[in-house]
Structure formats: C-alpha cells, structure tokens
Image: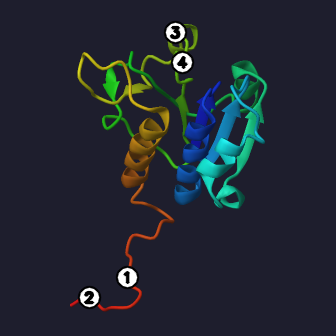
Amino acid sequence: MNIVLLEPEIPQNTGNIARTCAAIGADLHLIKPLGFSVEDKYLKRAGLDYWHLVNIHYHENFEDFKSKYPDVLLFMATTKAKHVYTEVSYTKDCFIVFGKETAGIPESILKDYPDTCIRIPMRNEARSLNLSNSVAIVAYEAMRQLNFDGLMCEGKLREYNWD
C-alpha cells in the first residue's frame, strides 16, 4: 500500500503518518513543496524510532508523481467526495492521496478522479479532521479489507497468561 501526501505543511502530522506507514508496511510518498525541512526535529520526534521501517519517496510535484506511476489505482481523500472511504475496494498496491492541511487536494486534480474520491463522514459544521488521523482511519480500513495481510493480529501479555 502507498500513502501519498500532497504538499504537507505540518511536520508533526507527517511524522505521525510515517509512523503509521511503518506500522502497516506502507510506502510514504511526499510531494513537494513540503512546508518543512526533512531534518525538522518535530518531524523526527513524531516518527520516533520508526524511520528505518518506512520507505519514503520524494516527488517534485504532482506531475512528477504521476509520471512515475501512470497507471496505478489512486484514491483521493477529500471532503468533496461522493463516496465514503468504506464503500470502495482497496488493493495491496493502491495509492491513497491526502492533500495539505490547509487546503486539501486542489479541485483541478480531483476532477480527474470522480469515482475514486473518498471521504470520511463527519458533521456538516466540521471542515475536516486532522491529517494524520485521517490517514490512520483510511489506511486501517484498507488494511482491514486486505485481512491485515502481513500484520500481527494477536498480542500477548509479557508477564501474565490470559485465562
């Protein structure tokens, strides 16, 4: 699976998203311009010690990204979508695109993806959810649909046994 951030602005969100990608084995694609340095201490701190578990790809702009992946299945996470994120079928190699925190994905891009724009339901009075929360919600639905393939689904206590 691939998580794509289009021009992310807040380093802590990107760090949290990198940690989610590490936990589920997703590649992270960052499309420039970025609103922070990749050396930012808040970015590094939010990602904790998971950075070695994440494959990060950088792209100069959306056109550069599309040229590298011309025929992939792209889902566009947006508040402007007709479809709820649980109504579509994700694949293990799909790309889920999220826009920048202050503006989302531009309509000039969304117009080309009417059938794969997805939204997280929320109250009409709310503009949007936090970017890292949105990524986690959608990514885990995609993983659920894929039967959590490759993920550990059972834990155990360290000092005690379950009765």
CA gap between label 4 and label 3 equals 6 Å
Horizontal side of 54 relative to 163 (left or right) equals right
Q: Inspect the image, locate mark 1, and give the three-letter code of the amino acid beneath it.
A: Lys
Q: Which residue is mark 1?
A: 156
Q: Residues within 10 Å of mark 2 (few under 14, many from 20)?
A: few
Q: Residues within 10 Å of mark 1 (few under 14, many from 20)?
A: few
In this picture, is 134 found above or below 93? above
Find residue 26 and report its horizontal and vertical position in percent.
58, 51
Say whether marks 2 and 1 touch (CB < 8 Å): yes
Q: Is residue 1 visible?
A: no
CA gap between label 1 and label 3 equals 46 Å
Q: Earlier in the sequence, mark 2 or mark 3?
A: 3
Q: Inspect the image, locate mark 4, and give the three-letter code of the amino acid beneath it.
A: Ile
CA gap between label 2 and label 3 equals 52 Å
Say whether marks 4 and 3 touch (CB < 8 Å): yes
Mark 4, secondary structure of its residue:
loop
> In terms of depth relative to the viewer, which is nearer, 75 or 5?
5
Q: Earlier in the sequence, mark 1 or mark 3?
A: 3
Q: Which residue is mark 2?
A: 162
Q: Earlier in the sequence, mark 1 or mark 4?
A: 4
Q: Which residue is mark 3?
A: 107
Mark 1, secondary structure of its residue:
loop
Question: In the image, which is nearer the foreground, mark 1 or mark 3?
Answer: 1
Q: Which residue is mark 4?
A: 105
In this picture, is 148 found above or below 145? below
